[in-house]
Structure formats: structure tokens, C-alpha cells
Amino acid sequence: MSESLKMSDPNDLGARIAKAKAERDAKAGRADRQRSQSVDNASGMALRYSAELVAAVLVGVGLGLLIDRFAHTAPWGLIVMMVLGMVTGLRNIMRAAQRLTEETMAQAAKPPKSEEKAE
């Protein structure tokens, strides 16, 4: 029989299992850190907020142009819907910022994992 097919020591198996679990936990920890860093970084949040505002304004302008075209009310449909788009975009930004603040406060209230009791 070859060397690799021989039965290994049971103690060695336990050590290999412990090593594999430690590697798995380390990979999971790195993945969690990367995920939180990519979501929470300032440039990502700024891009998200600006995209929400621009999208809301563009939808408002598009609807305003459609209203003006079919109702022959130019430029009032455009003006009203653009203002509503701006208000909606700002409202979405305020909601997202509030949600981010709540998540940050919840994370700050939790004790770090190193301070938890080990049993």
C-alpha cells in the first residue's frame, strides 16, 4: 500500500479537523470584513446616494415631459414633476442615511467578539 492510503493516527485526524475549522473560520472572517468594508466605505455610500437622487430626478423629468406632451401643458408638467422627483430623491437619501445610522449604532452597542465569555 502506498503511504497516503495508510490509516493515520486518530490524534492526527483531530488536529487536521481543528486546523481545517480554523482555516474556514479565518476565511469567513476575511469575507465578512471585506463585505462590510465594501458596503460601508464612504465612496460607495456617496455613489449610492447620488445615484438615487439622479434616478429620482430623471424619472420625474421623464414623467413631466410625457404629461406635457399629452396634456399640452408645457412647461408646467415638467416643472412640477421635476420638483417632485427632487423631493423624492432627497427623501430616499434621508431614509438611507437614517438606516445607515441605525445600523452603525446597533454595531456600536454590540460588544466585540474578543470580549465575549469563552466557555
Image (cartoon, helix red, strand yellow):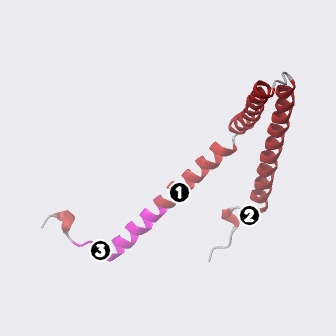
In which image quadrant can residue 14 be found?
bottom left
Report, in whole angstroms, how far the alpha carbon at label 2 lies from the one at label 1: 19 Å
Residue hosting label 3? 9
Label annotation for residue 52: none
Q: Residue at x 83, y 44 (%)?
A: 94
Q: Position of residue 20 (x, y in %)?
A: 42, 63
Disc 2 versus disc 1: nearer the observer = 1
Task: Tell me the element at label 2.
Answer: loop
Please tell me whether the stretch drawn in magenta is mainly helix, strand or loop: helix
Q: Is label 2 in contact with label 1 (beta carbons under 8 Å)?
A: no
Residue bounds of the magenta highlight:
7-23
Q: Amino acid at mark 1?
A: Ala
Label annotation for residue 111: 2
Q: Residues within 10 Å of mark 2 (few under 14, many from 20)?
A: few
Q: Is residue 78 above or below residue 102?
A: above
In which image quadrant can residue 69 be found?
top right
In which image quadrant can residue 76 be found?
top right
Q: Amino acid at mark 2?
A: Pro
Q: Earlier in the sequence, mark 3 or mark 2?
A: 3
Disc 3 versus disc 1: nearer the observer = 1
Residue 79 among magenta residues: no
Q: Residue at x 73, y 33 (%)?
A: 59
Q: Earlier in the sequence, mark 2 or mark 1?
A: 1
In the rendered image, the quadrant that contains the N terminus is bottom left
Q: Residue at x 75, y 63 (%)?
A: 110
Residue hosting label 1? 28
In depth, the one of 21 and 10 nearer the eye is: 21
Q: Position of residue 89 (x, y in %)?
A: 80, 37
Q: Is residue 6 above or below residue 50?
A: below
